C-alpha cells in the first residue's frame, strides 16, 4: 500500500556498530530505518527521501521507499531489461533483425555499467553480449565457454539499475558509445542511426512496462549524424563495364564462374536483389524462344547466419521486401537475359526444389561465395586506379546500375518502382543523382534562355535594358535659402568679364567663380545663445 503520511527523524549514531549511522523515518505510523558506514552516505540517503516527499511521491508502507526508489528496486538492471526486450522481439522477427538488435544492444549495454573495474577485453565482452546474451536460441540450447560466462557474470554484476538509465549523464555515455566501433574508429552514420533506433525501441519497452513515464531520450539534446540513402554515382558501372565484368566471371573462376555469370546477369538485367535471385525457381520464369520474358518473384532467401534462424540453416525463407505475405512482383526481362537463363537451365539443370542457382553441394548460394568470385572478376577487368575505388565494388551495385539505367532512359518512375519493389519516393531519393544525361540537357536549356551576350535571344529582345539616367542632385532647402539671402546682401561676386568671355556657362566649362567668405552669422548666433 502507498501512503503520503511520512515523518523523518534525525540521524541516529550508535557506536561500536559496523554501520553506526542510521536514517529513521515513519510511514503510516510504522518506523523504517537504514544504516550506513559513513555519515555522508546517511545524509545523502535521508536527503533523497525528503526530496521525494517534497515532490509529492507516495511511500510504500512495506519497504518504506518512495515511488522512484521502489521502481529502481523492482525494475531490475538494464542488462535484465535488455534481455527481456530481445525475448519480446525474437519470435517472428527476421534473422537480420535479430542480429542487428543484438549488436546494437551489446554496444549500449557495455556502456551502461557502474564502473570498469575488472572489465573483460572489449572484444570478448561484445561477443559475449551480441552472440550469447542477446541470442535467445543459443542461450537455451548451448553452454557458453568459460571466458564468455565470466564476461556475462561481470555484466550482470556491474549493470546499472534500469531506473537510473534516465539520468542524462548515463544516457549521454550510452549514445556516445553508439558512435564508435570496437577499434575506436567512428562508426558510419547509417550504423549510428540504426543503433540509436534500437536503443530508443528498448527504452520505449521500458515505458510500456511503466518503468518510465516517457522515453528518457526525448529529453536528451543529442544530434544524430546525417544519413543519406543516395547511391554514390561512382559505384554505378555503365553497360559496357557491366558486360566486361560479366564476361570476366567465367575466366576469373573457371569452376563456378559460368554458373554465377547468369546469377550476376539477373541482378543487372532484371534489377533483382541477391536474396531474390537465390530464391528464383524454374516455375517463376516465363522464358519464350524469342522476345521478352517475365519473372514472377514470390519470395527471397536472405542469409542472416545459422545462429539467427529458427531452423539453424544459413538462409531463411522470407516474403519479398516491402511486400505482404503472398504478394508477388512481376518483372519483364529482356531477350538477352532470357537466352542466358535458357542456356543456364540446359547446362546446369535445377535443384530438387526447382531453384536455378545452388552451390556444388546443392545448397543455396552463400553471400561469401559469390562475393569472392565477383572480387576476382573486378581484379581481372578494372585498372589499378579503379580497382581501389567504389566502382562496382559489390554485386549489389549491379542492381543500382540497372535502376539508374532505366531512369536515365526516360521510363516512368512509377513503372521502375514497381519492377524494383520500391516506392516512387524511395526510388527517386535513392537514384536521382545517378541519372546520366540530365546535366547536358539542363545546360542547353539554360544557355538558350540566357542567349549570347552580343545578340540577345528573340524571347528577350523586347526587354532591352534602358540606359540609366544620372541621378539629379537636390540642394537642401535651408542651403538654397541661405544662398539666396547671401546673394541679396552682395556676398557673392564675379570677376570682371571681357568681350572674349561673353557666352553662356555651357560654352565656358573652365570658367572660375570666386566666392567671398560668408559673414560669421552662425558664429554670432551661437555666441548669443
Image (cartoon, rainbow, N blue to C red):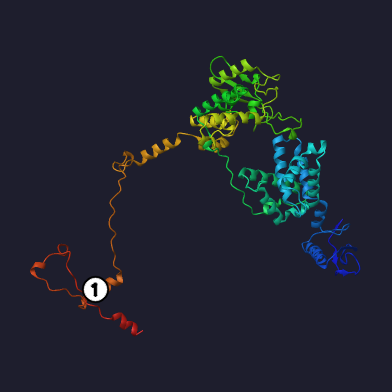
Q: Nearer the viewer, residue 322 or 390?
A: 390
Residue to which mark 1 is pinned = 484
Q: Position of residue 28 (x, y in %)?
A: 88, 62
Location of residue 490 by image quarter = bottom left
**Quadrant assignment for the C terminus:** bottom left
Q: Is residue 489 among the parts visible in the rendering? A: yes
Q: Secondary structure at mark 1?
A: helix
232 vs 90, left or right, is left
Q: Where residue 129 sits in the image (x, y, percent)?
A: 75, 44
Q: Position of residue 478 (x, y in %)?
A: 30, 72
**Image height of 501 relative to 410, above or below:** below
User: In the image, what residue occupies the spot 18% across and 75% down?
Assistant: 493
**Eyeballing the image, is 55 above or below 218?**
below
User: Which residue shows up at 81% across the image and 47% down it?
Assistant: 153
Res. 328 visible in picture: no
Considering every residue shown, the one lying at the far bottom of the view is 528
Is 492 on the left or on the right of 411, as rendered? left
Amino acid at each position: 500500500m502507498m501512503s503520503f503520511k511520512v515523518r523523518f527523524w534525525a540521524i541516529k549514531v550508535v557506536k561500536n556498530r559496523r554501520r553506526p549511522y542510521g536514517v529513521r523515518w515513519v510511514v503510516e505510523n510504522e518506523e523504517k530505518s537504514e544504516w550506513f558506514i559513513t555519515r555522508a552516505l546517511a545524509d545523502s540517503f535521508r536527503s533523497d527521501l525528503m526530496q521525494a516527499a517534497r515532490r509529492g511521491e507516495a511511500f510504500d508502507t512495506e519497504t518504506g521507499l518512495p515511488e522512484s526508489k521502489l521502481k529502481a528496486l523492482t525494475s531490475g538492471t538494464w542488462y535484465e531489461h535488455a534481455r527481456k526486450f530481445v525475448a519480446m522481439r525474437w519470435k517472428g522477427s527476421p534473422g537480420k533483425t535479430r542480429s542487428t538488435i543484438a549488436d546494437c544492444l551489446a554496444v549500449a549495454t557495455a556502456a551502461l555499467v557502474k564502473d570498469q573495474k575488472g572489465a573483460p577485453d572489449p572484444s570478448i565482452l561484445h561477443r559475449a553480449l551480441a552472440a550469447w546474451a542477446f541470442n535467445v536460441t543459443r542461450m537455451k540450447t548451448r553452454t557458453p565457454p568459460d571466458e564468455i560466462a565470466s564476461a556475462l557474470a561481470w555484466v550482470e554484476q556491474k549493470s546499472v539499475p534500469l531506473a537510473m538509465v534516465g539520468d542524462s549523464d548515463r544516457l549521454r555515455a550510452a549514445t556516445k558509445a553508439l558512435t564508435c566501433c570496437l577499434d575506436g574508429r567512428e562508426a558510419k552514420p547509417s550504423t549510428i542511426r540504426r543503433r540509436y533506433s534500437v536503443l530508443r525501441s528498448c527504452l520505449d519497452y521500458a515505458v510500456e512496462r511503466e518503468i518510465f513515464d516517457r522515453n528518457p531520450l526525448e529529453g536528451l539534446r543529442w544530434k544524430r549524424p546525417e544519413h543519406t540513402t543516395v547511391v554514390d554515382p561512382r559505384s554505378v558501372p555503365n553497360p559496357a563495364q557491366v558486360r566486361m565484368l560479366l564476361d570476366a566471371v567465367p575466366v576469373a573462376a573457371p569452376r563456378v564462374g559460368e554458373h554465377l555469370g547468369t546469377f550476376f546477369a539477373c541482378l543487372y538485367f532484371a534489377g533483382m536483389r541477391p536474396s531474390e535471385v537465390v530464391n528464383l525457381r524454374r516455375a517463376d520464369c516465363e522464358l519464350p524462344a524469342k522476345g521478352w520474358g517475365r519473372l514472377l518473384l514470390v519470395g527471397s532467401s536472405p542469409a542472416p547466419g545459422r545462429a539467427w534462424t529458427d531452423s539453424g540453416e544459413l538462409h531463411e525463407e522470407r516474403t519479398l521486401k516491402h511486400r505482404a505475405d503472398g504478394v508477388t512482383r512481376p518483372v519483364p526481362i529482356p531477350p538477352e537475359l532470357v537466352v542466358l537463363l535458357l542456356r543456364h537451365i540446359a547446362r546446369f539443370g535445377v535443384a530438387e526444389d526447382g531453384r536455378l542457382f545452388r552451390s556444388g553441394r546443392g545448397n543455396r548460394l552463400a553471400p561469401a561465395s559469390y562475393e569472392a568470385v565477383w572480387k576476382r572478376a573486378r581484379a581481372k577487368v578494372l585498372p589499378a586506379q579503379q580497382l581501389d575505388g567504389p566502382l562496382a565494388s559489390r554485386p549489389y551495385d549491379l542492381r543500382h546500375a540497372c535502376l539508374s539505367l532505366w531512369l536515365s532512359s526516360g521510363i516512368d518512375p512509377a513503372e521502375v518502382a514497381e519492377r524494383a519493389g520500391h516506392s516512387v519516393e524511395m526510388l527517386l531519393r535513392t537514384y536521382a543523382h545517378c541519372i546520366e544525361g540530365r546535366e547536358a540537357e539542363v545546360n542547353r536549356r539554360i544557355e538558350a534562355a540566357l542567349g549570347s551576350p552580343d545578340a540577345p535571344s528573340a524571347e528577350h529582345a523586347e526587354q532591352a535594358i534602358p540606359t540609366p539616367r544620372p541621378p539629379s542632385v537636390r540642394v537642401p532647402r535651408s542651403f538654397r535659402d541661405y544662398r539666396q539671402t547671401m546673394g541679396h546682401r552682395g556676398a557673392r561676386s564675379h570677376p570682371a568679364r571681357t568681350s572674349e568671355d561673353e557666352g553662356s556657362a555651357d560654352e565656358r566649362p573652365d570658367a572660375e567663380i570666386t566666392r567671398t567668405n560668408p559673414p560669421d552669422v552662425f558664429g554670432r548666433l551661437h555666441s548669443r545663445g
